[in-house]
Amino acid sequence: MDMNTTNDITNAPGIRQVLETVSSDLEVMDDIEGEQESCGVSNEHNGNTQMDLNASDDVEEVLANISEASRGVKEGTDAAYKRIMSAFNDFLVEESIIQPGTNIFTLQKLDPNIDYYIVGGPNNAERGYSNAQKLRAGTTYGFRKTGRRGKVPWNRATAQGNPSISDLVSSYMLGLHKRKVAKGETSTSARAIGPDTLRRLYAHNHQRENWDNDHLSQDNWCGGNTRRLLQAVYLIAFTCLLRIDEVLNLQAHEVDVYDDEDDIGCMSITLPFRKNAPVGGIPPFVLRELPEQMAHLCPVRAFSTWINASRINRGNLFPNIDKRDRPVTAKNTAMKAEVFLQLFRNNLWDLDIIPYPYGTHSFRRGGCQWFACELRWSIRQICEWGGWSTDFSHMTIVKYLISANDTPTLRRDEFFKLDRQVVKCMTCGRTCPCA
């Protein structure tokens, strides 16, 4: 591939207009991190720095177990990605970038400018944002899984990393997103997980055949202990607005479970540090047991259930689970976020929910919306609880509260249907539309 060919691609009118749309370095970095997060789990690597995980033997075993048990739920997505990969490969052959019979995803040596062809892929400039996302997801998957290039961002100077995770591709996606939104096309950012979905997950995971299951099988991809761990992590992240890494790395001495003066079960979580507080001094998250009708949202119940089952009383509270559905506590290592993400997505497949709009940030976003829309907390109260700035000088909270990709609260024909049936609020008991 020479620079003349590359220039032909980037100077195509549709692509040039998109790339000229200004995106900040921070936006590009956020997009790259989001694409890395969406990769999920891969236990396939080539032994160099491009592997997905610095995996111990325990993690390798966990990934292998998940891969085997998850085969059925991922077959459809795998086939869709392979169709995208095949179309992209055919496009490169037609453009004389690679020779017929060559698979771009298995080539060990790639042209440094290969990422230009991801943004200039087949009819890419004419397609919508959602189609561009599918093409990017397919190429990310292909270079990661087939090419074993992991999720390390593409480095054009060394031609190392995953070409689909690059500054150029991120800039293109951000520019396309802004242009399409300006034209009224719906965006597809990470989706918040809401109380209704958490209720369904709770009900499914608590079914006897799932809750009391102690082994993996093709029909049941995880045991009961895995589901107990997931429930605890889901609800701590959701109610405390924590990053998944912050939850997974919790230590026993950082969580205190007790009964208050009213004999109500409580737990206090004190983080040693956070991204915005690297030296500590973080106020504790003090949680009280929620009413029975809100058990599906209660982190105190979920955490107590997990601890009673796992009997963990020191070290990491959320370790990996082995193929016999037992916590791997010998090496005192926490579950990786990539492992959790795959387990979470498998759990969504249990409900026939397509999981790929969801990521680990879905819980923070969902919890934020729950506080604002159902518990009626003020923005200041949410910021104070979540540890965000309360001076409102930045709008970080807005991206958690509002996204066109979230599940709509009303159909478009219901906004002015003033006599529509309303649902009783579980917090205040009201049934008026504003509740």
Image (tube, rainbow, N blue to C red):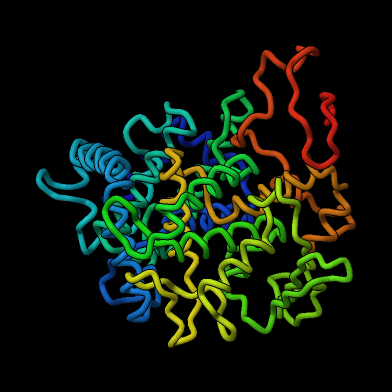
Q: Quadrant of residue 175?
A: top right
Q: Is residue 262 left or right of residue 54?
A: right
Q: Residue at x 42, y 79 (%)?
A: 328
Q: Nearer the viewer, residue 399 or 160?
A: 399
> Which quarter of the image is occupied by the C terminus?
top right
Q: Count numbered badges in the picture.
A: 0
Residue 43 at x, y = what percent?
31, 67
Q: Residue furthest left?
A: 101
Is residue 65 shown above or below 406? below
Residue 280 at x, y = what percent?
76, 80
Is residue 299 shown above or below 322? above
Residue 199 seen in this snapshot: yes
Q: Is residue 167 left or right of residue 90?
A: right
Residue 356 at x, y = what percent?
45, 45
Q: Quadrant of residue 92?
A: top left
Q: Residue at x 33, y 50 (%)?
A: 3
Q: Nearer the viewer, residue 324 or 99?
A: 324
Q: Residue at x 42, y 33 (%)?
A: 131
Q: Is residue 231 left or right of residue 47?
A: right
